[in-house]
Amino acid sequence: MPSYAASVRAADPDHAAPLYSVSQLARQLGVTARTIRFYEDKNLITPQRAGTTRVYSHRDRARLVLILRGKRLGFSLREIKEFLDLYDADPQHQLQTLNLQNSVRKRITKLKEQRAAIEESLAELGEIDRQCAEALAKQAS
């Protein structure tokens, strides 16, 4: 039995772009349908409706890929929404690219600060571990 998205495409021969059901899209992107609906609730994607069924376009899929990448890189949903909205507003994508570059540079700085804090914590924990080992060795002798 063909998917609902395939049925919609068959009913509209002028609509050549692929359409996806929420389960197809979730499976392809390795997320849950609930995750996709969450991003829809946050107005990051806007699927079409075929009756009561959500039907996702190639554009929705591309936006989801960008959302997931942005989340993986540590950007907030607010920042991701700004990037996506700028893409639609600026045909040359100059403002979007500049905004993205500024955000990426800030994120790099923050990650470097976190890395330094982690390295400092590891060194301190290593010293505590060494001191504990020495104390245990003295108690054993």
Image (cartoon, helix red, strand yellow):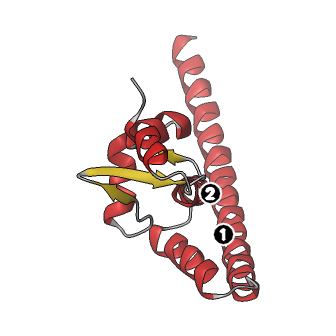
Of the two numbered discs 1 and 2 in the rendering, the one whose residue sits closer to the viewer: 2
| Residue kind at label 1, given as amino acid type | Arg
126 up-or-down from 120: above or below: above
**As displayed, is residue 11 above or below residue 46?**
above
Label 1 CA crowd tier, 10 Å (few <14, some 14–19, many 20+)? some
* 125 left or right, relative to 6: right
Quadrant for the N terminus, please: top left
Mark 1 and mark 2 lie on one chain; the one further toward the N terminus is 2
Q: Residue 50 — which label? A: none
Q: Could you tell me the amino acid type at mark 2?
A: Leu
Label annotation for residue 73: 2
Instruction: Tell me if label 1 and label 2 are in contact, CB under 8 Å.
Output: yes
Residue tagged 1: 107
Disc 2, SS: loop
Please state if 46 lies on the left or on the right of 67 as rendered: left
Q: Look at the image and tell me whether residue 31 can be seen.
A: no
Q: Residue at x 51, y 36 (%)?
A: 30
x, y (%) of residue 58?
58, 54
- Residue at 59% from the left image edge and 42% from the top image edge: 125
Residue 105 in the image, given as x and y percentages of width and height: 74, 75
